[in-house]
Image (cartoon, helix red, strand yellow):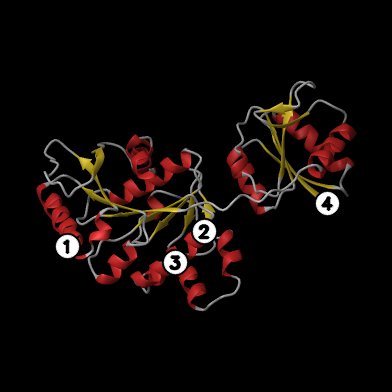
Amino acid sequence: MKLKVLILESDSNYLQRISSLLSTKYNDELDVYSFDDYTKALKSAKENEIDVFLASEDFDVSRKKIPGKCAFAYLAESPNEETIKDQKAIFKFVKINDLYESIKKVYSKYEYIPEPEVETKTVLFVSPSGGTGSSTAAASCAVHFAAAEKRTLYVNLEKLTSAKSFFSAESSVTVSDIASLVQNNDDDISSQLEEAAAEDETGIFVISAGEPNEILKLNVTDFAVVINALTALKQYEYIVIDGEFDLSEASLSFYRLADKIVFTSSGSEISNAKLLTAVKYISDHQPELSTKIAVLYSRFGETSTIPESDDLNNIGGIPNFDFADTKEIMTHISGMGVFDILAE
C-alpha cells in the first residue's frame, strides 16, 4: 500500500525540490501531494484520505481540522526541535532517504484515538418580522463559534434560502437528501451523514439546502427529522439553524428541538410590536419555550428602540452597517461578543 503524504510548505523552492525527490525515488511507496496554501491543503487531506500531513512551522495548523486518522508532524528548521506547538516535529533539511524514514516513523507511531462524542447545542435564528438581518446574524454566529475552535454546523432552512450569500461551500448531501434517507429508514444513514457537510473557508461546516424545487417540497416536520438526524451524530458542538418564523403547532414543536431560540428585531415600532406579540403568544401557549428565547436587536439605527418588557431576554444589539457588502458585515458581526451569551 502506498502512503499518501501531504506537504504544506511556504518555501516554494524547498517544496518543489523535496516533493520531486520523494516522488521520484519512492514512487512505489509514496503518493506525494504538495501545497503552499493552508485551506487547499486541508481540503486535499480530507478528499484524498491523506496518511501523513507535514507542515512547515510557518503555518499554525489546527489538529482538529485534520482527519483523525491522518498522522501529523511539523517540519522543523532545527535538528534539536522534537516538538513544535505541542506537535511532533521532524528535521526538514536531511538526506532524502532519512526524510523518508522519518515519514514512515511518523505514520507507524501515530495512534488514532477517536474523538469523544460531543454534546451538541442547537441555536435557532428566526424573526417575527422581516428585514431584521436574522440570516446575517445566524451566519455570523456560526462563524463566531468556529473561530473559537468549536466544530460548528450551519443549516439554512429558509424556503428561499440566502445561504450562498454567506458561504460558498456546497455539501454532497442536501437537506432534502437527509429527510429522504431518514424517512426511507436507510441503514447506512450515519456513515453518509458523517461526511455529508462541506467545510467552508470560514471554518464552519455547511449542509446545503439544495435546489429550490426540493426545499419547497419539505415542511417543518421534515426539518425536525433533519435536525434530529444531525444532532444524533454527536459530531458538532454547535448546530446553527437559520429558520423561518411561524406560530403553528408544528413550528412550535420544531422550536422545542433548539437549546436557544434567537428572535431578531430591528427595534422599529412595527418590528417591536410583532416581537412582543410573538413572545406573548408563546408565553401563553408554550411557556416552556419562553425560557429558551433570547432577543437580538439587529440593524439597530438611530430611531430604533428597545421595548420595555419583563418578558424579553435581551442579549444585545448589532448596529446597522452602511456601505459594506454581506461578507464585510458578517466579518464585523462575527467578532462581536454578543454571541458568547448563546454559548452559555
Tag 1: amino acid: Asp
- Would you name the residue on which mark 3 appears? 226
Left or right, 260 with reference to 176: left
- The tag earlier along the polypeptide, 2 or 3, is 2
Q: Position of residue 329 (x, y in %)?
A: 33, 39
Residue type (three-letter) at the residue carrying disc 3: Val
Q: Is residue 210 visible?
A: no
Amino acid type at image mark 4? Lys
Using the numbered discs, state the Cα–Cα distance from disc 2 to disc 1 in whole angstroms: 40 Å
Mark pair 2, 3: CA separation: 14 Å
> Is the residue under label 1 in contact with that under label 3 (CB below 8 Å)?
no
* Image quadrant in which the N terminus is located: bottom right
**Which residue in the structure is indicated by mark 2?**
171
Could you say whether the residue bearing mark 4 is in a helix, strand or loop?
loop
Q: Tally the marks.
A: 4
Q: Residue at 62%, 31% (x, y): give it.
A: 59
Lateral position of residue 36 relative to residue 337, left or right: right
Q: Earlier in the sequence, mark 2 or mark 1?
A: 2
**Circle 4/circle 2 CB separation < 8 Å:** no
The residue mark sitting in front, 2 or 3, is: 3
Circle 2 packing at 10 Å, graded few (<14), some (14-19), many (20+), is some
